[in-house]
Amino acid sequence: MPSFSLSTASVAVVFLSTATMSSAGGVQTSQGPGSFYSGGMVYDRAGNVLYMTGLHYNRAIDDEDMTGNSIDSESNCFLASIEMSDAGQGETFAHFDKWVSWGNPDVLETCSSMTMHNPSQLVVVGSTAPEGFFPNADPAVLLSGIVSVGSKDSLQLLSGATINSHSQPDLKLLYPMAVVSDSNNNVYVAALTSTDNALSEILGGNPSQPNWQKYTKYGSNMYMSIIKLSIREGQLKGVPKGEIDIEELWTQEFPLELEEDNVNASVSIGGLIYKVDSTGREMIVVSGSTRGRGRGYGSSAGGEEDGFLTILDPATGDLYSEITAQIRDGSPADDIITGICDDPTDATSFYIVGATKGSIGQQQADLSLIGEPNVNSLQPFIRKINLENLSEIWTLQWATKPPPENDPSSATFAYASDCAVDANGDVFVAGTIDAKASMVQGLMEHSAQGGSDVWVTKIFGESGSVDWMNQFGSSGDEEIAWYGGIVIDADGDPIIMGDTTGSMFRQRSSDDDIQTDIFVLSLDGPTGAIRNSNFIGGTSMIVEVQNEDDITTQTRPPETGDNPMDEQEEELEPLPEDQPPQNEEYPPQADQPEDIPPEVTPDHQYIPVALQIPGPAYAGGIIYDSATNSVMLSGATYKLSDGSISPNSMCFVGMVDLDHAVIHVADTYGSNELNEACSSVAYDSENDIAYTIGAAQNGEGAFAQTSDWDLPVQDSMEAGTVMQLNGRLRLMGGQRLADYAVVCPTTIETYRNYVYVASMASENPDENRAEEGDYPNFTTGGPLKYGSDFFFKIDRFAVTDVPDQYHDPLPATLEHDWEARFNIEDRGTIDVMAMELIGSQALIVVGSTNGSGGPFKDTDANDYDGWILKIDPNTGELSSVGAATSARIDSMNKQDDYIYGLCQDRHPARNMEYFYIVGSTAGKIRNLSDEEQLPEGSTHAFVARVNMDDLSAEWIKHFTMSSPDDSSMKSEALDCAVHINESGESIVYVGGTVRDGALMDGANIKESHGKDDIFVASVNGESGSINWMSQVGSDDHDSLAYGKGLEIDAFGNVIVFGETLGTIYAEHGAGEGGKDLILFTITQDGVYLDPRTRVANPPVYYGPTKRSNAPGNGALVAYGVIAGLIAVAAVTCFYQARYLKKKRAVTDKAAIFKYLQKFDVEDVDLRRSPPGGWHGTYLNKLAYGINKAAESTTIEEDIGSEAAPLTHSSVVTDSLFMESSSRPSLGLADDHDDGGEDKSARPGREVV
């Protein structure tokens, strides 16, 4: 293989003036007579320097303004660098720092891509004609491949070599396209090899100055060759020679098989990566596309274009195996792979990008907005690939919208060119879209800028959820570089490189529109915004409304000393003197109310959230983090990461970013051998630690190998687990709860560096009747598989460590401090459902029992009653504070009563005085005559305010229902959450499930959605009066989570978490018998996004039906429809915001929805603009009707506001709370026809 050195040729080095370029994150080559074309980039994180290569058609480039004095008839190579560290404050870069041209006049030279070789060198690959800048090219070969080594410091050529085909090099021309390096001074080149040397026809672009990154000058019917080269400093008997030796180690050629029609297909190369798997095995993964067949490409059933992936052994260049090393990937239509990128955070996966004419992934565009794509349209896609078997983990694809002047059904063309992964494991994709067409993400139609545009999107790597998308360009044509068009800098911001014939960072004259420039620009990683005041192109994120005019921004007012919300809770009783000293790494938490965070950054805004997460899965609980405006989820799932179904239940944790309404993290923990689930989650905001609790069969599960966790007892059938996760929900440690045969944790609390876990436990390991159905529910909402004669216990753990990285095996980061056990002394069983730490001196725990004795009081009845215990958090004993430490709850006519949840009043003046409980009762309702009572057999939901001191009921609110056939009805309130509104009032959100087609009285709909629905009510905390009632669901079974289904965000809106067997916000994805998870938000005024199940009508925003004395009319409003985007022009959004400001001096927290009620059209969709402000979209077609507000419905109140008296032993007596007797009925009272639903959604925990 011929080689050459710097001494044989000269090099022109240009140091560019800062005055010639734009500032703050973008640069475009200056006007010259010849074109510039981008090849690729690499980013040196250690030096914070960006390196670029490509080709150009200019002679004698001026070192002041980077213009050439004449056009070169053939292309030359270039290298350039940008020293990011030299940028000013707030700037990414403003100019090229160095520019080097490698080439001789009138001789073709190209540079297509580059890689970093060692700390001081760059390796660049391309092609050269004989007698060019790169010497030693065979004069008999029309074009030779080149591998050149350059200095990172000066960009000067240090060494190089030409490479040609081993057989018939004058006929089979080699075109190096992509290059990657390993950790052993080797590089790997992916090249195209022609089967002839005929002159090619240039079919596009500028024929006089072709872009040789896209075309080959000679040859046709290309196939793939992979070359391994060793690049080392030359030595003579161990003494350095001062030269760089380039040695070919092997070449593997992959010719295509001859087709039946004797016409060969051709190959295009998408790129290659060097990958080391989790076992340390090295491999080279090559991607590309072809219509042909042959070794290394897989087999093709037809003549369509398919992507291929091929894995080679770096040592020999051989395929690893005929099965796992190659794959044909695609749909029955044409599919191309145009790029590949490694995930440096994950040794088991990588990404490919490209385009398809078929359907190969989850469609990101809402097709109700743009219609079904033309079968000839080319749609971008990204796929996450499992390295072990090249199987799909997830795939996203995007349909696009034709230009407005075209037929709506006409074909459009877009593709993804390249991708890059940041330090968090999130992936950025860059691509190109055809002239005047628009990328569509959900309901967001991104505005086209004129010619072909560039688009970039950020995707959360674990979940495959899109964070943001931006489409930008100019009146000319833009295109992303082919091999290395996007990199991620040290700040996590994407930098893209491409070509333009328009004005991006300099104003081009009208007479140079045929020439092509190179542009490089940086985007803001978290938002996708272009951070450059001199950017003169157009972007779909251009609409940015200032805060004073932003009608949708909900930013909390600054907190002052005059605000009662600034006060801290009073700690009534200090921790005991013998408490271990606080670890400095785990400072005490302030007793700050959770829904009134100390700080809310002005960057966070409220947007409506409506997510349906495919199962089979079950909802456990949620917790809200105000610092990040995100909500953490826990539950159980049967769905594996590759989309297949596990035979056993696994623990599920996730995080939803509420700023963007996307799933940010989704992880599962479990095995195929044992059942596991997670039922509840807690968050220590002071130390950024999350904890989730669950149960694992046999006390092992995913944590069987954790050597220093407490061991389960010998006869353990089900053990509890407490998992410690970092702020991104990565599992870091934990502990096992396995001191009895059966331990089922149900609820968790954190305080300072302590964790409290309440569990149901049994010493009997016998298995109960197996649950019916394909997907048993092992969360709190499901029946108990093992045990009998349950008692409940509380365990306190001290946090001993918070690891900053993952360790295998997982360390025990919690040390058991004490256990408090509470037994039923006389018959029966017990449920423990919820626990809250109020202040620092009382753990309030609630549940239900049909037993008697001990702290649960004596009773001669057999019905289920609710119970409340007040426990000292320092000792686990019943608290000595207050007039009562326990209470038993029963109904006046001795029926079954359950307490499922509790929540504390967050107002500093009241949070030590009251709390709220929710549940269900089959008892009679006070103040209703016998004729007005619900039909016999009915169970209804209730909420009550309870006095902290004596555990008496301050007031009780019963939620009544109606049924079309006057049959018995059932509802249960499962959770509550309290918000302090701007007037200082306590607003209690109550959530639960209403069953069998019943309708909650006062609901915002006129009939049930069908079967079981979720309901949420807003209740005044002082009086118990209902502000509004919303009922949400599908035409199948929907239910609120049992563990923790409601939370309050920083703006006072309620977050709802549950399950569905139907279609609410997406098509049901769990399959027959499986449930999806759902998470959505409701504003303080009861406004939420309409479930998609009402497909017969245009989608609407649902608002509540309110009492006439509530703010606003609260009517159900349908908005008219206009196809198009409100925010296509900044002026439109600006004047809408101005209009609102004139009409209303004060904008409340649901202002956008009230504002939209002024429109005489239906269906307005809103999406937050990443740089600020909002995009509004009118949906569907014109004129569905005029906005006519429905009449408000007055909700009949049934409120008892007097304090309830106490009877003996602190048993609360009231029309709801009275001693009674009835038959035992835990899990048996719910005798409604469930229509085939699994039996997990029942009152209490059923022992089956």
Image: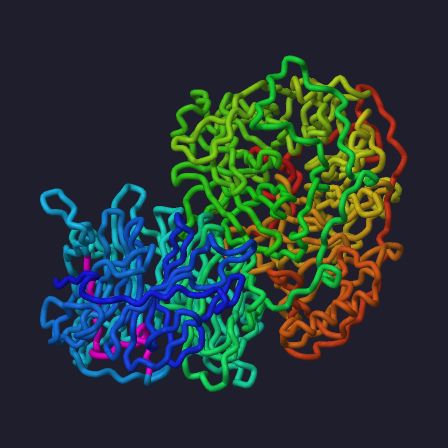
Left or right: 1124, with 452 as reference point: right
Counting labels gives: 0
Q: Is residue 1089 above or below residue 1126?
A: above
Residue situated in front as seen by the camera: 68 or 113: 68
Q: Which residues are magenta?
A: 209-228
Looking at the image, residue 215 sits to the left or right of residue 378; the answer is left
Does the stretch in magenta take in 220? Answer: yes
Picture layout, residue 236 above or below residue 508: above
Q: Main secondary structure of the magenta part?
A: loop
Give the quadrant of the C terminus: top right
The x and y percentages for residue 1033 are 65, 56
Residue depicted at x 79% and y 24%: 1211
State the quadrant of the N terminus. bottom left
Which residue is nearer to you in this view: 1198 or 901? 901
Which residue extends farthest top?
A: 578
> Is residue 30 magenta-colored?
no
Q: Residue at x 55, y 69 (%)?
A: 535
Residue 297 at x, y percent in the picture: 23, 65
The percent coordinates of residue 1049 (x first, y second) are: 68, 47
Residue 404 shows in this picture: yes
Residue 834 found in image quarter: top right
Looking at the image, which residue is at 21% across and 68% down?
134
